[in-house]
């Protein structure tokens, strides 16, 4: 039985080292070809006509004027007469033409007659949603009524976090060519091994007919798993245009309107406890929307899951807005924001430092020791004890404050198969149907393969982004690095065993007494019996060694290669101007574990990036809908705000790399670091202002309104 | 439905209006254009060519003359991406907010999505593809790799061109100047931490030659 477990920490040459991402030069020279960069000969451009109404019935569609435009090759009706449209931006027709400009002209020339129906696109005020509210049940544990009656201290607060979008910089879309015997599909995707089957299903074709190629992709964050209606329509346009390839990517307004959102979450939360900070009771009445399907309850209370007495009620609100998709750590950022806000407000009410209250109550979490250590470390990094004041820290009109956010995530490796081939000339290639969505997947796979084979990084060629390679799971839920590293490790160990069998007779050593190191194959404990990697590979014979490795989630934890359960703490220091209401980030600190860290350099990038996303969500990001027209008002990047370089303050990332965490194997990182930052920033603002701003993003308007409410109270 | 290929090859510009002639005709002053750079150019040119239909123009890109057929409404960005297969500049917001399409025209940093291809005829255009010969990396690109100032990488070429333009004007920037100088570009993955360090390193590298 092969031994797959990771080499000991102190023996690793490449894993755990700060290695620059391998596709960095391609990206930073502009030579990386993303799906939206694919220009094929005879390329056509697709464009969509979308519904301006949030709720309407299509009465009639007149294509005559569009058909008459020179250069138009095909027009398809997606939502024909009689179709009931449930959100603005719904695809109604698709056009292909020889230039993008002509395709857009044709879209404008299509006349659609709608019967406009009543819509609802706002949920902030639950009292106003009427029949669109659907109670999702009550959960009760212990005796919350008694806990609140007996409590030494109680708080009650209202908190809200709005719908935000993914705002992938490369919009959703693909280039697709309907050939005689196969469909070539270049989608911007997070799911190389599954998106082809998805397209085939929509087109009612065998999955074997779709070839997927996606070497680079410009951001997904959970929104780019399916082939999507626009992918299928691009394929049909290609077919109707004689198989010419069609490039169809959403324009920015459509991207921000229909290509996925993170559900909102609002809650009235009551906390009961003792004056020493121990929380004894929790009651929450929450509501959420993720579009027409409503929005499920975030995991409340978050992390502090075992508060002894708790009652949770949730209401789903169905809106006529573009539907939700997974958004980096689905439901966790919202849950962390709601929970950590309520706990911080409880700490304020009893006059305790929230850090002490968090430390006191992690006892009711799943990982008290880890959180205690991480809270202590983060506090040290941000200098909490010296800086924290319960009252207001003033400099003129500026107020500073500190806040905490907490995170938990699973992150076990997904199912993944990998093929590793050692050629007789000594070259090595890895084939895996995975994708690099910015995670440094290519780099990590190369590190694992090269580490295992005792070779330099440059000796291993990694091929991914193609569904003809062995299937690997989609990049979602922080499952990729654990999955692909484990399958690669196993494929490399399996291939190495075969190589040792070929080499053993020449060295006069049993195969299981050989090891690979420093580009050599040598006898364990007897380096005089050795040959170079190249010489060893000459013993392979004419047929390359090619072995599979598989990560099987059910058995992975037992093998020790990857497991689940990441914890993280983020703390923020902000400065608020009480005259303008502007919140400025001074510093955000993250302490994050994710088990064995394959590449600390790219891992830190990922954490810092998630902290910046939290800054966006805490200070500026919000999809704003208009109840009168039913449309998204800020479906552009001027008014759908993202943070720029000057907005993010100082970022301090501490990867919790310890022998104890390392021994757990690889755990996913993408989600856990994208959870706690919003709560940390919102709590820091509350600390700075001495008043809770109930809803993020903390826009000047909301900050000033909260201050005014306090004055009026 | 027929292809535009059947159009007359020597089609002459016809009377119609371009985005600029509309701006001038409507009496919109340069100050409405947010960047100021475009506005100066618009005012400096006394007569706008009024044209419509596809016209063949020659662009001076990375020191090479490139002929391309465009309608007057085609942006420089779309001419590069859709017609010249120069896809380093990306189309993200398509309205002058995010900087993913940043190019340098006549020494000025510009958003390729906010300038018409027909308006940059005769001006030297520099794109990411011209920053270093194939197989080599410009010091800015190298610094972005060293400091992992990229994740998905879609914003990266725009940031690198913005950095080029910024460092050309500010060879010894402070961290604060970098923040301001690159605030016309946006990244969604959040690569600013590495970026700040990368720009400082690139400045040093370029200075030391």
Image (cartoon, grey):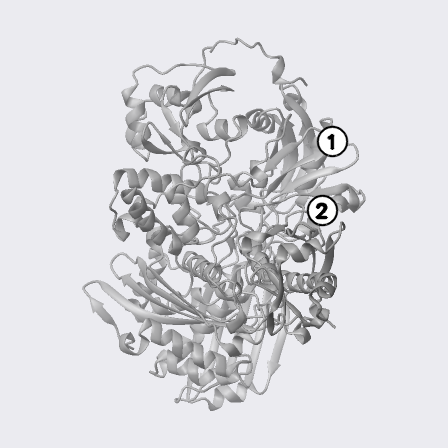
Can residue B180 be seen here? The reply is no
Q: Residues within 10 Å of mark 1 (few under 14, many from 20)?
A: many
Tag 1 residue: A239
In the rendered image, the residue lying farthest to the left is A396
Q: Earlier in the sequence, mark 2 or mark 1?
A: 2
Looking at the picture, how far across and down is residue A607, in whole percent? 46, 62
**Camera-side residue: A499 or A445?**
A499
Is B87 displayed left or right of A4 in the figure?
left
Looking at the picture, how far across and down is residue B36, in whole percent? 29, 32
Q: Is residue A8 above or below residue A216?
A: below
Q: Which of the 4 quarters of the picture holds residue A487? A: bottom right
**Camera-side residue: A509 or B10?**
A509
Q: Residue at x 36, y 16 (%)?
A: B48
Q: Of the numbered discs in the image, which one, if any, rests on residue A2?
A: none
Q: Where, quadrant-wise, is the N terminus of chain B in this rendering?
A: top right
Q: How many marks?
A: 2
Chain of the residue that carries numbered disc 1 in the rendered image = A
Tag 2 residue: A196
**Camera-side residue: A500 or A476?**
A500
Q: Residues within 10 Å of mark 2 (few under 14, many from 20)?
A: many
């Amino acid at each position: 039985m092969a031994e797959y477990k990771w080499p000991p920490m102190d023996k690793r040459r490449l894993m755990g080292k700060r290695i620059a991402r391998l596709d960095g030069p391609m990206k930073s020279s502009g030579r990386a070809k993303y799906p939206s960069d694919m220009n094929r000969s005879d390329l056509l451009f697709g464009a969509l006509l979308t519904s301006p109404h949030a709720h309407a019935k299509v009465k009639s569609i007149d294509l005559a004027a569009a058909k008459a435009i020179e250069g138009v090759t095909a027009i398809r009706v997606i939502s024909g007469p009689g179709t009931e449209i449930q959100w603005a931006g719904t695809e109604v027709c698709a056009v292909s033409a020889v230039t993008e400009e002509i395709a857009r002209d044709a879209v404008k020339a299509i006349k659609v007659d709608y019967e406009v129906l009543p819509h609802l696109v706002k949920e902030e005020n639950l009292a106003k949603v009427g029949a669109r509210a659907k109670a999702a049940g009550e959960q009760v544990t212990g005796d919350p009524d008694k806990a609140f009656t007996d409590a030494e201290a109680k708080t009650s607060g209202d908190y809200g976090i709005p719908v935000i979008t993914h705002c992938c910089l490369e919009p959703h879309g693909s280039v697709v060519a309907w050939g005689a015997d196969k469909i070539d599909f270049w989608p911007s995707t997070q799911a190389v091994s599954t998106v082809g089957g998805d397209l085939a299903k929509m087109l009612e074709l065998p999955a074997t007919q779709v070839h997927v190629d996606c070497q680079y992709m410009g951001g997904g964050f959970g929104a780019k798993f399916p082939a999507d209606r626009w992918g299928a329509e691009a394929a049909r346009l290609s077919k109707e245009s004689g198989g010419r390839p069609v490039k169809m990517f959403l324009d920015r307004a459509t991207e921000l309107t229909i290509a996925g959102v993170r559900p909102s979450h609002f809650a009235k939360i009551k906390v009961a406890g003792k004056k020493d900070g121990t929380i004894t009771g929790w009651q929450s009445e929450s509501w959420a929307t993720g579009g027409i399907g409503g929005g499920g309850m975030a995991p409340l209370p978050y992390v502090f899951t075992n508060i002894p007495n708790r009652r949770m009620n949730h209401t789903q609100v169905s809106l006529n807005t573009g539907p939700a998709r997974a958004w980096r750590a689905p439901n966790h950022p919202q849950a962390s924001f709601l929970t950590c806000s309520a706990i911080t407000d409880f700490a304020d009410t009893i006059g305790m430092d929230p850090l002490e209250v968090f430390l006191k109550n992690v006892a009711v979490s799943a990982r008290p020791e880890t959180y205690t250590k991480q809270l202590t470390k983060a506090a040290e990094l941000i200098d909490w004890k010296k800086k924290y004041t319960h009252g207001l820290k003033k400099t003129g009109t500026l107020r500073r404050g500190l806040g905490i956010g907490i995170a938990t995530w699973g992150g076990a490796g997904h199912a993944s198969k990998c093929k590793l081939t050692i050629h007789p000339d000594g070259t090595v290639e890895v084939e895996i149907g995975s994708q690099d969505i910015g995670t440094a997947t290519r780099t990590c796979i190369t590190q694992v393969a090269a580490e295992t084979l005792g070779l330099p990084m440059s000796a291993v060629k990694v091929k991914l982004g193609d569904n003809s390679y062995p299937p690997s799971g989609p990049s979602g839920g922080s499952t990729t690095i654990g999955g692909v590293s484990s399958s690669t490790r196993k494929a490399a160990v399996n291939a190495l065993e075969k190589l040792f069998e070929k080499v053993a007779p020449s060295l006069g050593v049993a195969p299981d007494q050989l090891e690979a190191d420093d580009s050599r194959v040598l006898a364990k404990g007897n380096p005089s019996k050795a040959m170079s990697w190249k010489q060893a590979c000459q013993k392979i014979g004419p047929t390359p060694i090619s072995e599979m490795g598989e990560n099987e989630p059910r058995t992975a934890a037992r093998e020790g290669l990857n497991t689940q359960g990441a914890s993280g703490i983020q703390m923020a220091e902000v400065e608020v101007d009480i005259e303008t209401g502007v919140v400025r980030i001074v510093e955000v600190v993250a302490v994050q574990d994710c088990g064995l860290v394959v590449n600390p350099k790219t891992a830190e990038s990922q954490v810092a990036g998630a902290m910046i996303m939290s800054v966006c969500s805490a200070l500026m990001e919000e999809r704003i809908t208009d109840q009168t027209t039913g449309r998204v008002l800020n479906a552009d990047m001027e008014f759908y705000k993202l943070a720029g370089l000057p907005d993010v303050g100082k970022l301090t990332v501490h990867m919790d790399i310890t022998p104890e965490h390392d021994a757990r194997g690889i755990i996913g990182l993408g989600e856990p670091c994208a959870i706690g930052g919003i709560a940390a920033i919102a709590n820091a603002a509350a600390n700075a202002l001495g008043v809770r701003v109930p809803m993020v993003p903390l826009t000047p308007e909301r900050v000033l309104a909260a201050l005014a409410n306090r004055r009026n109270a | 439905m027929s292809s535009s290929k059947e159009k007359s090859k020597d089609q002459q510009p016809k009377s119609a209006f371009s985005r600029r002639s509309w701006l001038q005709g409507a009496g919109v002053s340069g100050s409405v254009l947010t960047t100021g750079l475009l506005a100066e150019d618009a005012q400096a040119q006394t007569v706008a060519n009024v044209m419509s239909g596809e016209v063949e123009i020659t662009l001076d890109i990375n020191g090479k003359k490139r002929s391309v057929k465009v309608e007057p409404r085609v942006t420089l960005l779309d001419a590069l991406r859709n017609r010249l297969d120069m896809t380093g500049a990306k189309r993200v917001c398509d309205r002058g907010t995010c900087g993913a399409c940043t190019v340098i025209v006549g020494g000025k940093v510009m958003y390729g999505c906010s300038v018409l291809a027909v308006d940059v005829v005769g001006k030297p255009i520099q794109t990411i593809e011209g920053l270093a010969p194939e197989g080599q990396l410009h010091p800015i690109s190298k610094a972005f790799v060293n400091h992992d100032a990229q994740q998905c990488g879609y914003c990266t070429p725009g940031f690198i061109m913005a950095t080029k333009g910024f460092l050309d004007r500010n060879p010894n920037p402070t961290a604060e100047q970098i923040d301001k100088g690159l605030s016309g570009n946006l990244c969604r993955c959040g690569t600013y931490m590495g970026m700040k360090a990368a720009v400082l390193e690139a400045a040093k590298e370029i200075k030391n030659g």
